[in-house]
Image (cartoon, rainbow, N blue to C red):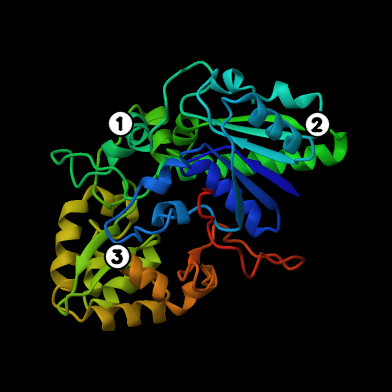
Amino acid sequence: MRVLELASVLAGPQVGQFFAELGAEVLKIEPPAGDVTRTWRVPSDNPESSVSAYFAASNWGKQSRVLDLRQPADQAALHALAASADIMLASYKPGDADKLGVAYESFRAANPRLIYAHLTGYGRASQRVGYDAVLQAETGFMHLNAASPADPPQKMPVALIDLLAAHQLKEGILTALYQREKTGQGALLEVSLFDSALASLANQGATWLTTGHDPAPLGSGHPGIVPYGTVYRAADGQRLVLAVGTDVQFGQLCAVLQRPRWAQEPRFATNPARVRHRELLEELVRDRIAELSGEGLLHELARLGVPAGAVRSVGQALSQPAAQGMLLPSAGAAYPYAGLRTVAFRSSTWSVAGNLSAPPELEG
């Protein structure tokens, strides 16, 4: 399978790497200055390389070719490549692809099997450029991501809306591939970051639609389950979270905390009661955990099957033995760093790529 990636930044390139990991040949088409994420650098990035850490997050397994699509010769080169492509990934403002001669209709006649997947910020009717932080603000995510209604909203520490849109685009492409097997015809797919964000509001969106109640920020707490998501600190300094979803699990938690009577109190015996008395219960649990060993508590909760986990840093998370299967092996001296897979599923009938080429340097 051949994929042409005209998309830049995160959402589209994530889709390109996804198909590279599944064995596709992915050619990344970059403007003369390169994908802008090559310049999004942290101080510890290698200044001698055009591959920044951000660029490396989404560009394993690809080849790169620079084309200036403002030039007729380079437009012609792209059209020649597109004649044998299966998928094209694009991320242009509405109208910009037409100006560059790279809109879906310009390829359709020569390659009716082409699946053209187009990402926009706000859909075809809007000229606005989509930036993840702005979309997090506009679609309710930042409002909800605060410790309390009195605290300032916060964006997520990853480009969450881009990643959600990438998943929507993958699903659309896979559906289009299935349809093409039946009809022989490709398709134009359009995904906006705005729609992807709204589609992901899930229970928070349903709360407003069904009750008229606008969900308020609760920090990492859950609006309908207690105790769930709150961060506690144990006597040994270990930070941990609980995800107690059933009354049985709550009873087991109380037993481990050596406070079995809490599970019998009318204020806490059922989840709806615990939600109503959230502040009191959270205070009791927080104070009790502060008296115990976090490591011992997590061990005992795991033994009983009560959902709980340690709060880890990114480095700690990726250093776990269980995480090693999600890492792409180092490509050697030219690029001596591991990569992070985008494909998290496994199949009994095919395997994802064991090794991929490193993120490509920019030509020239």
Distance from Cα at disc 3 to Cα at disc 1: 25 Å
As helix, strand or loop, the secondary structure at mark 2 comes to loop
Q: Name the residue located 81 percent from the left edge and 38 percent from the top edge.
A: 180
Q: Name the residue located 15 percent from the left edge and 41 percent from the top edge.
A: 151
Upstream in sequence: badge 3 or badge 1: 1
**Amino acid of disc 2:** Asn
Q: Name the residue located 46 percent from the left edge and 79 percent from the top edge.
A: 321
Q: For this view, does 9 lie left or right of residue 274?
A: right
Mark number, residue 214: 1
Mark number, residue 350: none
Disc 2 target residue: 111
Upstream in sequence: badge 2 or badge 1: 2
Rendered position, 95 above or below 35: above
Upstream in sequence: badge 2 or badge 3: 2
Mark number, residue 241: 3
Q: Position of residue 11 (x, y in %)?
A: 50, 42
- Dot 2, how many residues are within 10 Å of its Cα: few (below 14), some (14-19), or many (20+)? some
Is label 2 or label 1 in front? 2
Q: Name the residue located 75 percent from the left edge and 40 percent from the top edge.
A: 85
**Amino acid of disc 1:** Asp
Q: Position of residue 224 (x, y in %)?
A: 34, 47
- Dot 1, how many residues are within 10 Å of its Cα: few (below 14), some (14-19), or many (20+)? few
